[in-house]
Image (cartoon, rainbow, N blue to C red):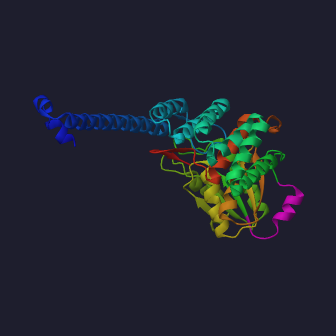
């Protein structure tokens, strides 16, 4: 069609009959529309490519409790996604991705606003209503949360039941008193069935050495390992620094402190708390573990436990009992009550573990 249109000349057009002229005008309009469409697609592709590059950029930060270094420039990611949405206003995936970027930023109100904007376009979308059910609850808007959850139930009773289970789990985990060692009752319970200790990694220093927080987690792990010599020990963390991974260094440290290598399972691939939980669950299922003690920092252990339990819901082992032991990276009294920021992080990672992808706008695809 393009070659035909380009071959037309003004004299040729004048020689055409009125009917032929109308057909030619229509053809040129189609070409113009196609050019506009191609141009728009190119701009959207460019914006999403930039969003991915920004997300993957080395300008990142690391907080206590984060195994991986998280992007610090989510506002730029959000801007690119929203610019793309202006060009393609039917693409609610762009709004969902932007909302999740704001969740990472800790901007709950803006995330809810973006999700409500997406809901206006797609009122029956399961994920949009699922997110709203959770984030409105975290915000304290219980009625709005119930309304969104009811919409989910109307569409998919199984999803609504899963969200109810997630909410109940997070409420339980966040009310558990932080502890630096097992209670007598927990020790007694842990002697039954197959047992494992799951120790979550923490970002290594740039030179590949272990941070004091990771060493603190290992001290707690060593104490537990000596108290229960029959337990397996899963050491999870795969963010490399100077050709080292957390899993490998943790295993070496425990072996150097008297723990038999046959008990140690290195997990050298996880790059986030979500992956810590998923990959550890695979190992727990493989060894048919009945009872697991999760070890992490006090500021992170609730999130780690909620994620691990959610991962085991999907992969097994079924009926796994999980308890947690904390390394006090911060005073426990300061962490006795769960802040909205911590609750935000817990729900965010639990939903990711459950299978709701944070970024779903190719090429920016991230669980």
Residue range of the region highlighted in magenta in the rendering: 182-195
Q: Would you say residue 201 sits in the magenta stretch?
A: no
In the visual, does 299 lie left or right of 30?
Answer: right
Q: Is residue 249 above or below residue 123?
A: below
Is residue 201 in view from this perspective?
Answer: no
Q: Nearer the viewer, residue 356 or 246?
A: 356
Q: Is residue 243 above or below residue 84?
A: below
* Percent coordinates x, y for residue 148 in the rendering: 71, 43
Which quarter shows the N terminus?
top left
* Percent coordinates x, y for residue 82 in the rendering: 51, 32
Question: Residue 37 appears in which quarter of the rendering?
Answer: top left
Q: Is residue 295 above or below residue 259?
A: above
Q: Nearer the viewer, residue 298 or 106?
A: 106
Q: Nearer the viewer, residue 159 or 188?
A: 159
Q: Residue at x 82, y 67 (%)?
A: 191
In this view, the residue farthest toward the right is 185
* Percent coordinates x, y for residue 271 in the rendering: 56, 49
* Percent coordinates x, y for residue 72 in the rendering: 55, 33
Is residue 189 in view from this perspective?
Answer: yes
Question: Residue 25 appears in which quarter of the rendering?
Answer: top left
């Amino acid at each position: 069609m393009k070659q035909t249109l380009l071959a037309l000349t003004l004299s040729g057009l004048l020689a055409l009959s009125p009917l032929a002229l109308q057909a030619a005008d229509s053809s040129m309009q189609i070409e113009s529309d196609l050019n506009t469409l191609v141009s728009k697609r190119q701009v959207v592709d460019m914006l999403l490519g930039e969003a991915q590059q920004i997300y993957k950029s080395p300008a990142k930060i690391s907080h206590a409790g984060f195994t991986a270094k998280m992007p610090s420039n989510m506002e730029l990611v959000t801007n690119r996604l929203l610019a793309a949405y202006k060009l393609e206003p039917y693409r609610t995936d762009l709004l969902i991705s932007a909302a999740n970027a704001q969740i990472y930023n800790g901007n709950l109100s803006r995330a809810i606003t973006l999700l409500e904007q997406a809901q206006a376009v797609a009122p029956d979308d399961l994920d949009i209503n699922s997110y709203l059910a959770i984030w409105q609850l975290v915000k304290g808007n219980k009625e709005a949360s119930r309304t969104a959850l009811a919409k989910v139930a109307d569409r998919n009773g199984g999803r609504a039941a899963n969200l109810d289970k997630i909410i109940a789990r997070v409420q339980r985990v966040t009310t558990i008193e932080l502890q630096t060692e097992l209670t007598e009752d927990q020790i007694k319970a842990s002697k039954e069935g197959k047992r494992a200790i799951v120790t979550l990694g923490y970002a290594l220093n740039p030179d590949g050495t272990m941070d004091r927080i990771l060493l603190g987690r290992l001290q707690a792990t060593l104490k537990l390992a000596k108290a229960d010599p029959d337990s397996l020990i899963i050491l999870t963390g795969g963010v490399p620094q100077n050709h080292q991974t957390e899993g490998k260094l943790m295993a070496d440290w425990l072996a150097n402190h008297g723990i038999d290598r046959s008990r140690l399972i290195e997990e050298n691939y996880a790059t986030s708390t979500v992956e810590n939980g998923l990959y550890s669950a695979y190992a727990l299922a493989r060894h048919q573990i009945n009872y697991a003690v999760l070890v992490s920092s006090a500021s992170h252990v609730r999130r780690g436990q909620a994620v691990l339990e959610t991962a085991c819901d999907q992969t097994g082992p079924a009926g796994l009992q999980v308890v947690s032991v904390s390394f006090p990276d911060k005073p426990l009294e300061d962490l006795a009550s769960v802040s909205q920021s911590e609750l935000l992080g817990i729900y965010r990672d639990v939903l990711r573990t459950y299978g709701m992808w944070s970024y779903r706008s190719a090429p920016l695809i991230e669980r």
